[in-house]
C-alpha cells in the first residue's frame, strides 16, 4: 500500500510539473504574441499618419539648418575646429530623436488610458514588461525614423562622416529608449491633454536648447559650466556628437554611464508603477 501510494504521489508530482511547464510555455507564447501585436500597432500608427508624425519635425529641423547653420553659421565660422553647421548637425538630429520618441509614447499611452483599452491589457495574461517594451519600441521607431530623415536633411547642408558608427548607433537607440520611458512615465500620471504637454513645453524644450546643441560648454563661465553639467541632455548630445564627429565636451564613458543609468531607472520605475496600477486605477 505504501509503495502504491508513493507511486501515485510521484505521478501526481510529475503531472503537476508538466502542467506548470505547459502553462509557462503558453504564457510565454501569449506574451510574445502580445508584444508583437503592441509593436505592430505602434509602428503602424506612426506609419499611417506619417504626415503628422514624421514630416513636421523634418521641416522644423530644416528651418534650424537654414537659420542657424547657413545664415548665422557663416558669421560664427568654426566651433571646436569644425564648421558651425557640421557642429550643430548631431545636436539637431538628437533633438529630433528626443522630442519624437517622447511625444510618441506619451500620446499613444495616454490615448489607451482615455479610450479605456489599457485596462484590458492590464487584466490580460500579458506581463507588465510586455506592455512597457511594446510601447518603448514604438517610441524608438518614431525617434529613429525622424532622426534618419533629419540626417538626410543635414546632408543637404553639410558633409557628415560618422567617425564611430557603433557608438553613434548605440547612443541614438539608448537615448530614444530613455525618452520613450520618460514619455510613458508622463502618460501614466497624466489626467488631461494639458498634462501631456506640460513636460515637453516647460521641461524638455528648455533642457534640449541648453543641452549643448548650439554651443560648446567651453564657451561658458565655470559657474555656468557647472550648471550645464546637471543637464542630462548635455551628455546625450555630446555622446552622439562624439560618435559622428569624434569630438565631445564630456568623457564618453561618463555619458554612457548616465544614459544607461537613466534608462534602467525609468524602465524599472514604469514597471513598478504599472504593476501597482498607479495613475490608472482610481
Image: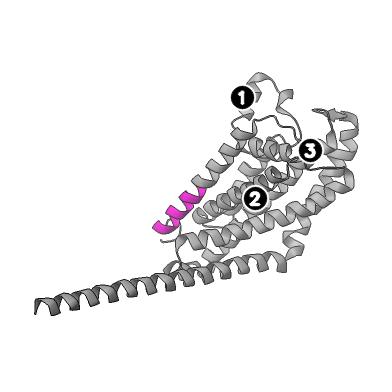
Q: Using the rendered view, name the quadrant where residue 76 is placed.
A: top right
Q: CA distance from mark 1 to mark 3?
A: 22 Å
Q: CA distance from mark 1 to mark 2?
A: 27 Å
Q: Position of residue 43 (x, y in %)?
A: 66, 65
Q: Are marks 2 and 3 in contact (CB under 8 Å)?
A: no
Q: Position of residue 224 (x, y in %)?
A: 65, 24
Q: CA distance from mark 2 to mark 3?
A: 19 Å
> Which residue position holds label 2?
173
Q: Earlier in the sequence, mark 1 or mark 2?
A: 2
> Which residue position holds label 3?
88
Disc 3 element: helix
**Magenta region:** 266-276
Q: Is residue 126 left or right of residue 161?
A: left
Disc 3: CA contacts within 10 A as few (<14), some (14-19) or many (>=20): many
Q: Position of residue 128 (x, y in %)?
A: 46, 61
Q: Nearer the viewer, mark 1 or mark 2?
A: 2
Q: Using the rendered view, name the quadrant where residue 207 is placed.
A: top right
Disc 1: CA contacts within 10 A as few (<14), some (14-19) or many (>=20): few
Q: Are marks 1 and 2 in contact (CB under 8 Å)?
A: no
Eyeballing the image, is 169 above or below 14?
above
Disc 1 element: helix
Residue shown at 69% from the left, 36% from the top = 238
Q: How many marks?
A: 3
Q: Is residue 20 left or right of residue 267?
A: left
Amino acid at each position: 500500500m505504501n509503495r502504491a501510494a508513493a507511486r501515485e504521489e510521484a505521478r501526481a508530482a510529475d503531472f503537476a510539473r508538466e502542467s506548470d511547464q505547459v502553462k509557462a510555455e503558453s504564457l510565454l507564447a501569449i506574451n510574445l504574441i502580445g508584444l508583437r501585436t503592441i509593436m505592430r500597432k505602434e509602428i503602424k500608427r506612426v506609419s499611417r499618419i506619417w504626415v503628422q508624425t514624421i514630416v513636421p519635425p523634418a521641416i522644423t529641423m530644416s528651418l534650424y539648418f537654414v537659420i542657424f547653420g547657413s545664415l548665422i553659421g557663416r558669421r560664427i565660422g568654426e566651433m571646436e575646429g569644425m564648421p558651425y553647421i557640421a557642429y550643430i548637425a548631431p545636436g539637431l538630429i538628437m533633438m529630433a530623436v528626443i522630442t519624437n520618441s517622447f511625444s510618441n509614447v506619451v500620446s499613444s499611452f495616454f490615448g489607451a488610458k482615455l479610450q479605456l483599452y489599457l485596462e484590458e491589457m492590464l487584466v490580460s495574461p500579458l506581463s507588465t514588461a510586455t506592455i512597457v517594451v511594446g510601447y518603448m519600441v514604438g517610441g524608438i521607431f518614431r525617434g529613429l525614423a525622424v532622426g534618419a530623415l533629419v540626417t538626410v536633411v543635414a546632408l543637404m547642408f553639410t558633409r557628415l562622416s560618422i567617425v564611430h558608427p557603433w557608438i553613434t548607433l548605440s547612443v541614438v537607440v539608448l537615448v530614444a529608449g530613455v525618452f520613450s520611458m520618460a514619455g510613458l512615465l508622463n502618460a501614466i500620471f497624466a489626467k488631461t491633454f494639458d498634462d501631456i504637454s506640460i513636460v515637453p513645453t516647460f521641461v524638455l524644450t528648455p533642457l534640449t536648447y541648453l543641452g549643448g546643441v548650439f554651443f560648446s560648454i567651453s564657451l561658458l563661465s565655470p559657474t555656468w559650466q557647472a550648471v550645464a553639467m546637471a543637464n542630462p541632455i548635455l551628455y546625450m548630445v555630446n555622446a552622439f556628437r562624439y560618435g559622428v564627429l569624434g569630438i565631445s565636451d564630456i568623457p564618453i564613458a561618463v555619458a554612457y554611464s548616465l544614459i544607461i543609468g537613466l534608462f534602467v531607472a525609468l524602465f524599472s520605475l514604469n514597471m513598478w508603477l504599472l504593476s501597482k496600477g498607479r495613475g490608472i486605477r482610481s
